[in-house]
Amino acid sequence: MAKAPGKSKAAKLAPAKPAPARPVLLSGGNPQIAKAYGDAPVQAYIAAMPGWKSDVGHRLDALIVGAVPGVYKAVKWNSPFYGIEGEGWFLSLHCFTRYVKVAFFRGMSLEPIPPGGSRQKDVRYLDIHEGEEIDEARFANWVKQASKLPGEKM
C-alpha cells in the first residue's frame, strides 16, 4: 500500500507564517494607523475603514487627488490629512459609527459653505452616511477652493 502524501519533515519543522495583522479599530470603527507621511499610510487607513466606509474613503481620496494633483498626505491622530507641502493642511477624514466625516479647516471661506457646523469658527464638515450619494462636482470644487486657502499648521 502506498503511503498517503503528507508534509515533509522539513515542512513540519518550519515555523508557520503569522497571519497578517488586522488593524485595530478605535471608537466608531476609526482605524488606528501610526502617524506617518505620504500616500502609503493614507491608503492603509482607507483599506482598514470598515465596510462601506472603505469605498467612500477610496472615492474621496480619488476626488481629492484629481482636484489637487500632487496633494500632500499624512495620517495624524488616526485620521488622513490632505494639504499642500509647506503650506499646511486643508482637509481631513475621520470614521464614526454611522458616517465618514470630512473636515474642511477653512470651510467658512468655501462657496457654498459645507453644511456641517463646528465649534471652531472656520471649520465646516461634510458627513457622509451609508448609501448617500456624494455630489462629486461640489466636493471637488470645495477641495480645489480649500487647497488655495492658508492651511492649518498641525
Image (cartoon, rainbow, N blue to C red):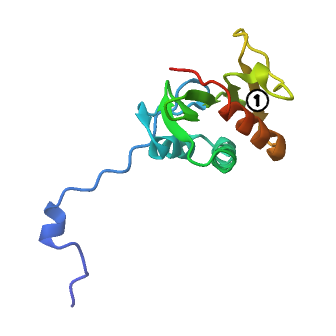
Asked if residue 100 can be seen in this view, the reply is no
Is residue 46 shown left or right of residue 67? left
Residue drawn 82% across and 46% down?
137
In this view of the protein, which residue sits in the foreground, 40 or 89?
A: 89
Q: Tag 1's secondary structure?
A: strand
Viewport quadrant of the N terminus: bottom left
Which residue occupies the extreme right position in the image?
112
Q: Measured along the vertical axis of the image, is residue 11 above or below residue 73?
A: below
Q: Position of residue 153 (x, y in %)?
A: 52, 20
Q: Name the residue: 50% across, 35% down.
A: 85
Residue at image location 21% in from the left, 89% down from the top = 2
- Residue 97 appears left or right of 12: right
Q: Amino acid at mark 1?
A: Asp
- Specify whether residue 59 is in view: yes
Q: Is residue 15 above or below residue 91?
A: below
- Circle 1 Cα neighbour tier, 10 Å, few/some/many (<14 / 14–19 / ≥20): some
Picture coordinates of residue 54 (x, y %)? 63, 45
Q: With 88 as the anchor, is 135 left or right in this view?
A: right
Count of marks overlaid on the render = 1
Judging depth in this view, the residue of 149 and 40 nearest the camera is 149
Residue linked to disc 1: 127
Query: Within the image, what quadrant is residue 118 found in?
Result: top right
Residue shown at 49%/35% (left/top)?
A: 74
Q: Observer-nearest residue: 145 or 62? A: 145
